[in-house]
Image (spheres, grey):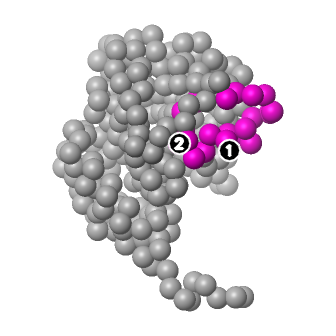
Amino acid sequence: MAVELYNDGKHACLAFYDLVHEEADFAVQSNQFLVVDGEHGALIDPGGNMTYNGLLMGMQRYFPIRNLDYILASHADPDIIASLNKWMVTTNARVLISKLWTRFLPHFTTGRDYSARTIGIPDEGMLIPLGGCKIKAVPGHFLHSEGNFQFYDPVSRILFSGDLGASLVDHGHASEPVQDFERHVPLMEGFHRRYMVSNKACRLWAHMVRNMDIEMIVPQHGARFVGKEMVNRFIDWVERLQCGVDLMSEKNYRVP
């Protein structure tokens, strides 16, 4: 299912939900994104091999694949970038990922050298020109990956947040925005407590994004946060979150 998150006639942001619905019983739900500016486009977190065919067909209704400029990967998990080889073969796009992960990408391809089409994002992030706009690669280190980036579109004012904000919703419901934040928290809490590294990283992120003009936070799993009020509630929640190493103790390090 393709959902228009933003479209002003020239610039559009599309989310693709539940492309692997038939494998719902054993595959983690994941979302894929396409940002288009004029005749230029960027795929964000295109996913694994199960999403490839559905995403390819879905995006071609909105944008010719031959014009794809970039594949933007928040980090190097299989549900983010395992389909890389297919995209590198079928497009001329360049792939951008944290510089920590560039030398791991060949494990997702078939041995051909794609280093000339690979750009390592420095730790401080970078601006990515796309048509007449510039996508911002925003640091999200240790949320949850060591080298992790989120992607902010200044035209739509959408922050594509990767795994931060992920929720474990039933297939078919991910395309619905969060309506009741308190009822949504239990769908996020367990995942974030285990997969996010520490409250320090959460607080640093919250301090950074409070200075950004964000109308929507869209994670790679589950539902999105729409509107300033919901966005700020999510940021407040992340800022207070105890997670990862905060929760570890000797009981978690015992020889079986």
Q: Which residue lies furthest to the right in this view?
A: 111
Q: Which residue is drawn at 65% across and 24% down?
A: 116
Q: Mark 1 points at which residue?
A: 104
State the residue at coordinates (34%, 31%): 153
The residue at which mark 2 appears reads as 98
- Going by the numbered disc 2, the residue's amino acid type is Ser
**What residue do we see at 23% from left, 41% from top?**
212
Magenta segment: does it hold 113? yes
| 94 to the left or right of 194 | right
**Horizontal and vertical percent position of residue 249:** 50, 85
Query: Is residue 251 positioned above or below 172 on the image?
Result: below
Locate residue 214, reporting x and y percent. 25, 40
**Percent position of residue 81, x then y:** 62, 40
Amino acid identity at mark 1 = Phe
Question: How packed is label 1: few (under 14 Cα within 10 Å), some, or many (20 or more)?
Answer: few
Mark 2 or mark 1, earlier in chain: 2
- Decide if residue 58 is in sight here: no
- Is 38 situated above or below 155? above
Q: Answer few, some or many: residues within 10 Å of disc 2's Cα (few below 14, many 20 plus, some between 14 and 19).
A: many
Q: Is mark 2 on a helix, strand or loop?
A: strand
Q: Is residue 173 left or right of residue 229?
A: right
Q: Is residue 107 above or below residue 113?
A: below
Q: Give the range drawn in magenta.
A: 95-115
Q: In which quarter of the image is the C terminus?
A: bottom right
The answer to which quarter of the image holds residue 10 is top left
* Percent coordinates x, y for residue 163 in the rendering: 47, 51
Quarter of the view holding residue 136 = top left
